[in-house]
Amino acid sequence: MRKKKAIILDRDGVLIEDKDYSYKIEDLEILPGVIEGLKLLQTKFVFFIVTNQSGIGRGFYTVNDFLKYNNHLISELQGEGIRIEKTFYCPHLREDRCECRKPNPKYLFDIRDGWDIDLKLSWMIGDHPSDIEFGINGGCQTVYMSTGHGKKHLNELEELNIKPTFISSNFFHAAESILKLSS
Ligand SMILES: [Mg+2]
Ligand SMILES: [Zn+2]
């Protein structure tokens, strides 16, 4: 049987407004084009979220706060008929030098092995240079969103010579391009 293809999604600044360490449900705001874009993509891809949540390690919120907030997003998406297979999160600080913080590709390999995913035909979508490095480290194609923190880090991509497959400012447009490039 042919392997499945995945879209691996950063959460903050890609699916929802990045309000810096937010965990309160009333702050949760899905970004424009996300629902429509995911509906378009789910004909061909399965979805995962991979998110760095150092706010947990910093003590700004607990794992439980994170899970409640994230589950709220998952059920909002579910209400639109969109299924997220699983959310992977890193609760650590950069200084912890853990295995699971992006750009370390550990979670991509977990996704590959757990769901029989072909990473070469899969895409990582993120709004931070480390998301793109993460995707590249796992052999995925990548989209850099200039939403969220994407705008302010755009020049770092060049400085660090990190090359996404393409850059986009709208999730729906990104989804259309992914489909075009994947056919
Ligand atoms: Mg982000
Ligand atoms: Zn970690």
Image (spheres, rainbow, N blue to C red):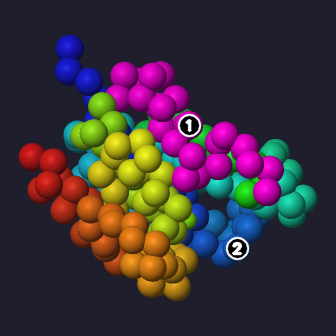
Residue 35 visible, this orientation: no
What residue is disc 2 on? Answer: 20
What residue is disc 1 on? Answer: 106
From this view, report whether residue 134 is shown above or below residue 127: above
The x and y percentages for residue 162 are 39, 67
Tell me which amino acid carries mark 2.
Asp
Kindly give the residue lying farthest to the top in the view shown: 1
Residue 111 in magenta stretch? yes
Q: Residues within 10 Å of mark 2 (few under 14, many from 20)?
A: few
Q: Secondary structure at mark 2?
A: loop
Residue 108 in magenta stretch? yes
> Which mark is in front, 1 or 2?
1
The range drawn in magenta is: 95-117
Q: Residue at x 51, y 68 (%)?
A: 128
Q: Residue at x 20, y 21 (%)?
A: 2
Tell me which amino acid carries mark 1.
Lys
Q: Quadrant of ligand 1?
A: bottom right
* Left or right of 59 in this view: 97: left
76 or 64: nearer the viewer: 64
* Res. 21 image quadrant: bottom right
Residue 64 visible, this orientation: yes
Kindly give the residue lying farthest to the right in the view shown: 59
How far is the residue under mark 1 from the one under mark 2?
24 Å
Q: Residue at x 73, y 67 (%)?
A: 22
164 or 174: nearer the viewer: 164
Q: Secondary structure at mark 1?
A: helix
Mark toward the start of the polypeptide (1 vs 2)? 2
